[in-house]
Amino acid sequence: MAVRLAVRAANPRRVVRAVRRRFGRAAGEQDALPDNAVLDGGGDRTLKTDRVVLRPFSPRDLDRLASQMGRPGNEPSLPRWRGEEMLAKEIAVTYLTWVIWPLHDGEPLGIVGLSLLQIDGRPEHELGYRVFPPAAGRGLATEAASAVLRFAEEELGLRRTVSIVEPANAASIRMLEKLGLRHERDTDYGGVPVRLYACPSKDETCD
Ligand SMILES: CC(C)(COP(=O)(O)OP(=O)(O)OC[C@H]1O[C@@H](n2cnc3c(N)ncnc32)[C@H](O)[C@@H]1OP(=O)(O)O)[C@@H](O)C(=O)NCCC(=O)NCCS
């Protein structure tokens, strides 16, 4: 699949280079998107909510993102290189990634993005998100994801956006329910059992 970049390297520098290569190949990736995804029609892709601003990811952000990723909190603390590698992999599979920032100065709060995944043999636009421990539990992830869902529908013209989540990820499931997505079915992705959440129907918005 053209949108998906296989990043198998264990060395974080190679992963970063892979992310850079991926960002240099945006035009080719767009060929894999359906006609209704008008990536260049989105205008300024910076999105604002009441409490956060979402700015398009740049590889320059990776250092600051990785240092937030390694902070102790609701996930095991990771060595810095491991955090960077994990983030790079997440970012590499998305065709649009935003970094979540506070409205004013501060450290990045998380990432949110859209990927084109083959799920059960069908291309699906998948919403993905992560907030870092210092920002978790304040509703910011829900706020950011809601802005991206609106952008997907209104600016990209996507009629269907889904999210897959592991059944044990209670916070993520609650978040998807708050966003108005509904549990459509259980399946597996890459050999991992997941729940697939989707907007109620292609004619309804999630908001
Ligand atoms: C999933 C994630 C983005 C949620 O972030 P968050 O900042 O807690 O999200 P929000 O505060 O916007 O909303 C979380 C909701 O889940 C609830 N929640 C949190 N932990 C929960 C748990 N263990 N069980 C049930 N509900 C839980 C919160 O109470 C909140 O619901 P409420 O507003 O009704 O009280 C965050 O935990 C994360 O980044 N996890 C690691 C990456 C990840 O799992 N990404 C998703 C992959 S599918």
Image: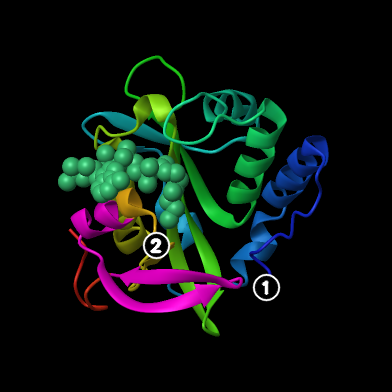
Task: Say which residue appears at 52% left-offset and 25% top-offset.
Answer: 68
* Mark 2 surroundings: few (<14), some (14-19) or many (≥20) residues within 10 A: some
Task: Say which residue appears at 68% left-offset and 69% top-offset.
Answer: 2
Q: Is residue 8 left or right of residue 188?
A: right
Q: Please give the label number shown on residue 1.
A: 1
Q: Position of residue 73 (x, y in %)?
A: 44, 28
Please, what secondary structure does the residue beneath circle 1 have? loop
The kind of residue tagged 1 is Met
Q: Quadrant of residue 105?
A: top left
Depth check: give the residue in front, 153 or 114: 114
The kind of residue tagged 2 is Leu
Please, what secondary structure does the residue beneath circle 2 have? loop
* Residue stretch rendered in magenta on the structure: 173-198
Task: Say which residue appears at 74% left-offset and 39% top-offset.
Answer: 16
Badge 1 residue CB within 8 Å of ligand 1 = no
**Residue 144 can be seen in this image:** no
Residue that protrudes farthest toward the top in the picture: 105
- Relative vertical location of residue 193 with respect to residue 67 in this rendering, above or below: below
Is 192 magenta? The answer is: yes
Q: Is residue 40 left or right of residue 26?
A: left
Q: Is residue 63 left or right of residue 133?
A: right
Cα distance between the residues tagged 2 and 1? 20 Å
Q: Position of residue 199 (x, y in %)?
A: 26, 70
- The residue indicated by pointer 2 is 156
Q: Quadrant of ligand 1?
A: top left
Is 23 magenta? The answer is: no
Q: Is residue 146 left or right of residue 35?
A: left
Q: Position of residue 5 (x, y in %)?
A: 71, 59
User: Where is the N terminus found, in terms of image quarters?
Assistant: bottom right
**So how many labels did they put on this image?**
2
